Image: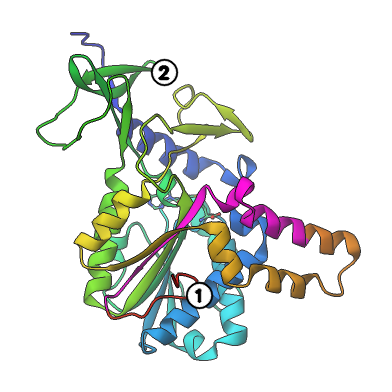
Amino acid sequence: MDAAPAERLDRFMGRANAAYYATHDPFADFTTAPEIAQAFGEILGLWAAVTWDLLGRPDPVLLVEAGPGRGTLLADALRAIGQVAPGFAGALSVHLIETSPRLRAAQAAALPAGWAARATWHDDLARVPEAPLLLLANEFLDALPIRQFLRDDAGWTERHVADGAFVTRPAPVEEIPLGEIPTGEIIEVCEAAHAFVGALAARLARHPGAALLLDYGPATPATGDSLQALRAGRPADPLAAPGEADLTAHVDFLALANRARAAGAAVHGPLAQGVLLTRLGLFQRTDRLARGQPPARAAGLIAAARRLAEPHRMGRLFKALALCHPDCPTPPGFEP
Ligand code: SAH
């Protein structure tokens, strides 16, 4: 067997992304829904406010965002909550789960006046206080490190990285149940996403609360290599320059939904992002923002909303999954 030093793919990806988020403004390389349209964060904030009401208005309550990037989603959400849901605004405290010091500073600067001084940053969910909570996460799970397992004629191997290239090593099949897939196929497992969703769902089983997770990935189980890198706005080789590109992989929503149910949460979705945003009033809010604006600005706002919702753009590949306390009525937008 080849004895060259090799790093397991998830360790490589975790290290590469930690370096990347610590040193780069990721938004030079890619854009995300809250950066495209302010209405996105606003309606997710109102989703949290309405769901808080359905939960019986627990007070105090935590408003948590995981992986807040530039802080834009939370800033838009808090502004909307302040305007239309003063009861929720008065009951909530803000918690951000973020490892990058650079992005923590950007988030503090982005929050509306008065909120940053009262917000708390955490390295992971385990450090967020135990209490009723509403949690939002957009494009957080796709940044978490994955393992890849390859099925060939001889059985299972696992992908490692050495000198900028994939190498395979025997897979620890006794530790990881891999099921059956055709020879030549790859399956991906994101243990960090499973751990996050399992811990989140266990909290939601203990306290009133709900979470809305938005990310990209298929609605049905899929095989294949979905690891991708974006560098300077363009697809790049994920292994070539660790720390210089943003690495992501598809989120396996069905596996995460099963994990959440097993941990005691009620699960709604996954639902196509375009369907959820349209039901929650993305276009009504956008029309309202566009009213009275110069024509070019109004057209830009409408184009941005369509980019988020149209199926052939971000509306179908992106999905929304809601996890709730078992007694919570169906949250807004997830009605059958
Ligand atoms: N939600 C934002 C940003 C998505 S980028 C948006 O929609 O624009 C991914 C975010 O997750 C970044 O803020 C990144 O620093 C954070 N992140 C990535 N891995 C993380 C980890 N293991 N723990 C905490 N935060 C992480």
Ligand 1: does it lie within 8 Å of the C-beta at label 2? no
- Occupied quadrant, residue 232: top right
Q: Which residues are magenta?
A: 301-326
Does 176 sit above or below residue 325? Answer: above
Q: Is residue 68 magenta?
A: no
- Mark identifier at residue 164: 2
Q: Secondary structure at mark 2?
A: loop
> What's the amino acid at mark 2?
Gly
x, y percent for residue 193: 32, 49
Q: Residue at x 59, y 50 (%)?
A: 314
Q: Position of residue 139 (x, y in %)?
A: 48, 51
Amino acid at circle 1: Trp
Left of 164 or right of it: where is 44? Answer: right
Seen as rendered, the residue at the extreme top is: 1
The residue at which mark 1 appears reads as 47
Q: Residue at x 59, y 62 (%)?
A: 72
Q: Is residue 108 visible?
A: no
Q: Secondary structure at mark 1?
A: helix
Label count reads 2
> How crowded is the residue under tag 1: few (<14 C-alpha within 10 Å), some, or many (20+)?
many
The mark found on residue 294 in the picture is none
State the residue at coordinates (67%, 52%). Answer: 307
Quarter of the figure with the C terminus: bottom left
Q: What residue occupies the far front of the structure in this picture? A: 336
Image quadrant occupied by the N terminus:
top left
Instruction: Report the residue at 31% width, 16% height from top.
Output: 167
Q: Is residue 156 left or right of residue 279?
A: left
Find the distance from the CA under tag 2 to the CA under tag 1: 43 Å
